[in-house]
Amino acid sequence: MKRRVPIWWFSALAIVFVLPERPVRVDACCPVFRSGKNFRIADQRVLVAWDPQTKIEHFVRQAAFDQPKSSQPKNAQDDSLTLERTEGVEPDDFGFLVPSPSEPQIEEADAQVFDLLETAIEPRIQTQERWSVNPFPLALSPFLLAASQTALRVNSDAAPKSSVSVLQSKKVAGYEVAVLRASDADELVGWLKENHYEVRKDLQDWVEPYVQRGWLITAFKYDVNTKRTRVGSVRISFATDKPVFPYRVPKDQFSEQGRGNLLKIFVVGPGRASGILGQPDSSQGWNRGKLRFSMPMEPSKLDDLLGKSIPDGSLSVPHRMWLTAWDDPTWPSSDEDLWFDFDAEGVAYQEVRTVVRDRLIYLPIDVLGLLAIGAGLVIRRRRGR
């Protein structure tokens, strides 16, 4: 007698073969990857700290590589660089490119700074009391008073060819890093091809303007020989007359249907920071980020906050520097870079959340009714005299 196969078995088999492979996600200024792979930009947090005297910018971004779930600690967190391993996906399948206007110095940074920054910009809580009258029968007062409680509501107003020079080659924070100078975009693309990265048209279009302007490209790639289980956060320091965040990405990385990832930007500089999209002297303002915080900070407090995320003494300004923070839920969605300007006389800002505490005045209506009746009788009696 043949054994009947339950119909649910065919359904399960269909699910195994029909469901698409989960995409591998990478966040970076420009992700690059091995041919045939599908990396997408994910959420990230970045810190830009710029000294107006030395003209040095320290750019810190959080990046972490997650091991397979079987070996991943239960409490492991990933805030910016995620590789969800599937069959056939290896760590050396991904990397990213970061442009800079001058030769950078790359070091590992303390990622704890982002948690400290998040705490520092928490909204200020203000409490309001709202009084209202609650009439009730006195006979039920023990039950009502025992059940009453204060109500809280929170309201919130990315071997080289001849035209590509490798200026630096090192290993940092679990990455193999190469700082590249190219005089021809096609040659830089050739370098990527020789290193087994897919060079799609959007990536080539992304590289072209940086090469034309003489910018350098720092290529990061996971170090397959590292003994680390997770890559660390990276600090990129370079000279620039005006601080910049490489906001621009290849068009194939744009968010779909207006739904972006969350980009958290923290900027330290000599005043309240504002964003400029495009060229540093452009008048095109940046209004995609929601301002969360902009306040001057005492040097000692700022040093404690930034800790080892930037080099000691790298902010030489004697007066107070400002910390400005935005949340941008639309990124990646632009083919322009984001520059920052500062206003030392700017208006400080901190989010305010209002906590409303409802306070009730209990009026015993039955007692009030008796008093009203009594008062009426008294008045009536006086009129009868």
Image (cartoon, grey):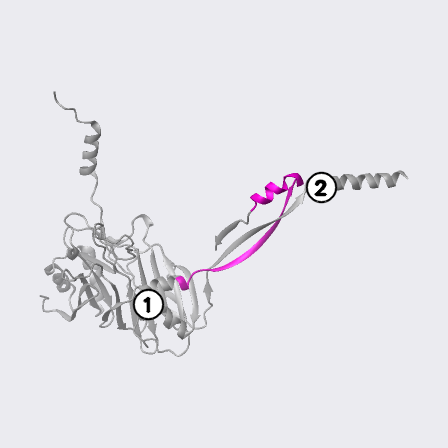
Disc assigned to residue 244: none
Q: Nearer the viewer, residue 244 or 351?
A: 351
Please provide percent x and percent y for residue 52: 35, 76
- Image coordinates of residue 141 in percent, x first then y, are 63, 42
Question: 51 above or below 263?
Answer: below
Q: Residues within 10 Å of mark 2 (few under 14, many from 20)?
A: some
Bin the neighbour count of mark 1 within 10 Å (Cα to Cα): few under 14, some 14-19, many 20 and up: many
Q: Is residue 284 visible?
A: no
At which x and y percent is residue 254? 27, 53
Image quadrant where residue 14 sits: top left
Q: Quadrant of the C terminus?
A: top right
Taking the magenta stretch, the answer to whether it contains residue 130 is yes
Q: Residue at x 67, y 45 (%)?
A: 363
Disc 2 is placed on an element classified as helix
Name the residue furthest right. 385
The mark lying in front, picked from 2 and 1, is 2
Q: Amino acid at mark 1?
A: Val
User: Residue 104 occupies which quadrant of the picture?
Assistant: bottom left
Pick whichever of labels 2 and 1 is earlier in the sequence: 1
Classify 255 as above or below 99: above
Please say whether residue 310 is one of the residues in the magenta stretch: no
Residue at (18%, 34%) from the top-left corner?
13
Q: Nearer the viewer, residue 361 or 107?
A: 361
The residue at which mark 2 appears reads as 367
Q: Position of residue 222 (x, y in %)?
A: 18, 60
Residue drawn at point x = 52 percent, y = 59 percent: 126
**Relative to 167, is 86 above or below?**
above
Of the numbered discs in the image, which one, if any, rests on residue 48?
1
Report the magenta residues as a range. 119-148
> From mark 2 to mark 1, how far is it between C-alphas?
67 Å
